[in-house]
Structure formats: structure tokens, C-alpha cells
Amino acid sequence: MNYKPTRLGFGEGLKEIAVKNKNIVALGAADITSSVSVDLFADAFPERFYSLGIAEQNIMGVAAGLAMAGKIPFVATYGVFAALRTTDQIRISICYNNLPVKIGGAHAGISVGPDGATHQALEDIAVMRVLPNMTILSPCDATQAKLAVIAAVEQVPGPCYIRFGREAVPDFTSPELPFMVGKAQIMREGNDVSILSTGHLTFEALEAAKILANKGINARVINFHTIKPIDENLIIKTAEKTGAIVTCEEHQIFGGFGSAVTEVLAKNYPVPVEFIGMNDKFGESGQPEELMQKYGMKADTIIKAVEKVLIRK
């Protein structure tokens, strides 16, 4: 198994799409350019890269101005700053004007590890998905992160938030797997229960499904690389097919991916649902794998959730 950080996929995608589109520019926040892999773009296109220091609100305002001038700006910084510190500027300057600003939210989730609670973006999905005109992409591995960046330019005319992590994670998808914004991907078929996942937890969901198969439980695994607009049609169809759902995200349970899924189910086809994610807590400093285990975002916890939801089914 190849391991690769999703942030590297983001940087590779930005560099590749910038070769095709001369209007793409990138904005960074001082000392973290390499931390979010935008250095790949900066080294290749120094004349199209702007470092504006540790002033995230200002960066969003400048990005909006560049977009009004015909550019396609990419802003990348840690998700806690990209989505939370700058919410006002994103809401009014970018989303209200429906501008093609693409925002990279790095260091998403608990797996940031030693940086601790202040740098672990666990609320960014909830904040970004309530903003009109905003598209949210949450790729499951580095290969898909690269495709997400390209799709953000080629398929999304307005604002787009791309969520990705810091640590090396399994890079298990194929670059040939079609990436269509708003269309989830069935990664494994099953009839007993549906595991709907986003981001890094898609791999954990697949691992859980393998173990469940040995127990005689056939789990359907669906990867949602797009959280907004969410694939309502597939959510409804999988609920009809299996009658029970577990949602998985490296994010707060409230207001995130699981909430988006249950909003669709409540209106169209209610079924029992269990949630995997951060349960209304802040994170802490620690090794990524230890934190994922402690806060219940590993395959073994997904298995327990599946067994619980099947009883309710």
C-alpha cells in the first residue's frame, strides 16, 4: 500500500491545472506555504504566487479582488484559518458575489496530531456548507485530492472549499476513477448496510467492510468526495437498498457530513443511522493514529456502529 499526504495531491493538482490555465494564481500565508504544498506552484510560477503574510482575512479580500479582475485565485492555509477565521470575508466578498475563489483547507480533522486542538479543523464542513454558492470537496486520498483541484477549476464556476489533511494516508484510488462534482462513488457493493464516508475515513470504511464480510455482513461503501452539492439521489437509493446507514467523517458529528446525509433521508426515506465522527469535543495533542483510535474514527468503531444500526434496522 502506497502512503501519501492528501496535501501533496492538492499541490500536485494545483501545479498541473495551472499549466493549462494561465489565469490561475495562488495566495499563501507566509511560513506555511510548504506545509500546504503550495510551494510546488510557487516554485513553478513565482510570478503568479503572492505571499500575504499571516493575515488570512486580508488574503480572502485580495482573492476576491483578483477574481473580479478575471483571475482564478487559490488560497491555501490551515482549515481552522481558511474556514473559521475568514468566514465573514468568504461569506460577503466571495460567496455573495459568487466568485471563482478556490480555498484549500489543510490540516483537516483530528489526524493533524501533535499540533493539537487549535490546529485541528473539525468544524469547517459545518461552516462552509451553510454558505450559499459554496461547493465543498473532501477527497479520500492524495490521488483524489489532485483530481479535486482540477475539478474545482473545470467543473465549479463559483467558490469552492477543498478539504485535505497533513499526514501520509493510504493512497488507494485510481486516477482513472471518474471525479464528477456532486456524484458519490460506490467503492464496494453490499445489501445489508450502507457505510457512507468522506475524506480519510473512506479507507477505514473499506477496511471495516472487509472484516464485516467475514462476519457474514455485506456492507455497501460509498465515498462522498463532494459534500455540497451532496448526491441526494444515491443517498435515497442506498437507503432503499440496505435500510440502514452509518456515516463516517473526520469532523464534528453536528452540522457536518452526517447531518447533510440525514437531512436528505428525513425528507425522502428515513432509515436508522449511526454516526462516526468527533462527538462534540475538542481534540488534543498526540500521534495521529492514537487520536483517531481514541476518538472513535477507526475501522473497529465503524464495525460497532454497523452492528448497532443493524439491530435498529
Image (spheres, grey):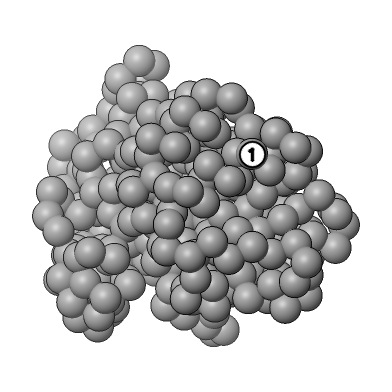
108 lies above or below 30: above
Residue 137: where, in percent of width, then height? 53, 47
Q: Residue at x 33, y 72 (%)?
A: 112
Looking at the rendering, which quadrant does residue 302 occupy? bottom left
Q: 245 left or right of 232?
A: left
Q: Is residue 229 visible?
A: no
* Residue placed under numbered mark 1 in the picture: 65
Q: 275 left or right of 79?
A: left
Q: Which residue is more in the foreground, 67 or 301?
A: 67
Q: 304 left or right of 64?
A: left
The amino acid at mark 1 is: Gly
Identity of the residue furthest to the top in this view = 267
Crowding around mark 1 (Cα neighbors within 10 Å: few <14, some 14 to 19, many 20+) is some
Residue 83: where, in percent of width, then height? 39, 47
Tell me the element at label 1: helix
Report how many numbered discs are placed on residues in the image: 1
153 lies above or below 3: above
Residue 13: where, in percent of width, then height? 70, 64
70 lies above or below 147: above
Q: Residue at x 60, y 27 (%)?
A: 98
Q: Residue at x 33, y 39 (%)?
A: 126
270 lies above or below 34: above
Looking at the rendering, which quadrant does residue 43 occupy? bottom right
Q: Is residue 26 visible?
A: yes
Residue 195: where, in percent of width, then height? 38, 49
Q: Residue at x 76, y 53 (%)?
A: 24
